[in-house]
Amino acid sequence: MTSATSTASRSKSSASLRHRLAERGVDTKLWLLVPAVVFALLLFVYPFAYGIGLTFQPLAGTQEKWGGGFFANYIAFFKDAFVFDSVWLTMRLALPAALFNVIVSIPIAFKLRGKFRGKRFMQTLLVLPITLGTVLTAQGLLIFAGRQGWLNRFLMETGIISEPLQLVNNYLGVFFSLVISGFPFAYLLISSYLSGIDPSLEAAAKTLGANWKQRFRRVTLPLLAPGLATTFILTFVLAFSVFPSARLVGDASGDTRVLALMAYRAFSEQLDYSMASTIAIMMGVVELIVIGIVFLGRSFLYKGSTGGKG
């Protein structure tokens, strides 16, 4: 009896503790989050904090050349034209590529929204480039669009052109690579957001006499705006951090001298880890500025919730 009473007492005490914690908004199941928190601290928070700390530890040569003490790396970033110009070169690639992927994905997602024979096959073809990766995409572009590639050989043999077109190892090569690798993500996201919009809303607008342009501009576009903003941001970040394409099918010292290449150059060639961290931090700052502008623009276009995925 004594053992049974003791067990019942401990069980009651444990239940009472859980109730008291629950009243204070503390759930004991939250302990299951501890491994995830430790994982995030070790693989994200600590490296990020360490990288920020490195930016305030400039090399002696950087301090002597640019001055500024602890902020010498940031002063060098803004004053060194070779490095700072890479911001505009990266934006010049990332913004058009992200816009192109989003804009082209919209009509295709609309067209494939309904049910028809061959829909899965078409979707598979559109999403297939995800499996290739940036390196294989770059290799394919070199084989297909290089100076001795299939496309140039065909055009020259048919007499359409007299000398090979320069489609790779320049801005166009990197842009094509970003479109090939970024379009499937944009298409999948926009298709998902479209599926969250109730088709009866468009049907109701049609019964009221709205043509397809009016239905898209007044009904679908406002509801799709949150999804378009999210899709643009994700494809922009993907394009902004471009590295393999800029090196393999671009001009690493010319018009595709992106920020990621500058960080790699500072890290591996100059062994200036503090400057490499500074460039990485500035990449994040530029991305956050663009993201903020996109969210601000979205708030003017649409306020509220679609009630679905959008």
Image (cartoon, rainbow, N blue to C red):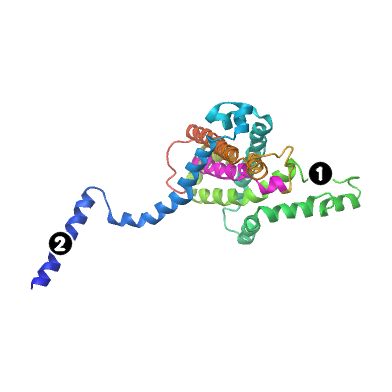
Amino acid type assigned to the residue bearing label 2 in the image? Lys
List the residue tagged with mark 2: 12
Q: Which residue is mark 1?
A: 166
Pair 2/1: label in front: 2
Whether residue 306 is visible, yes or no, is yes
Which x, y percent locates residue 144?
78, 53
In the rendered structure, does residue 242 fall within the stretch colored magenta?
yes
Label 1 sits on a secondary structure element that is loop
The answer to which quarter of the image holds residue 31 is bottom left
Pinpoint residue 134: horizontal percent, then vertical percent. 66, 52
Q: Position of residue 260 (x, y in %)?
A: 63, 42
Q: Is residue 161 left or right of residue 236?
A: right
Picture quadrant where residue 254 is located: top right
Image quadrant holding the N terminus, namely bottom left
Residue 168 percent across, percent down from the top left: 77, 46
The residue depicted at 57 percent of the width and 30 percent of the height is: 72
Magenta-tinted stretch:
221-247
The crowding category of the residue bearing disc 1, from other C-alpha atoms within 10 Å (few below 14, some 14 to 19, many at least 20), is some
Residue 188 placement, left or right of 262 = left
Q: CA distance from mark 2 to mark 1?
A: 78 Å
Which mark is first along the chain, 1 or 2? Answer: 2
Residue 310 visible in the displayed image: no
What secondary structure is found at the residue carrying circle 2? helix
In this view, which residue lies farthest toward the bottom? 1
In this rendered view, identify the residue nearer to me: 97 or 207.
97
**Is residue 49 or residue 199 the one in the foreground?**
49
Of 263 and 299, which appears nearest the observer?
263
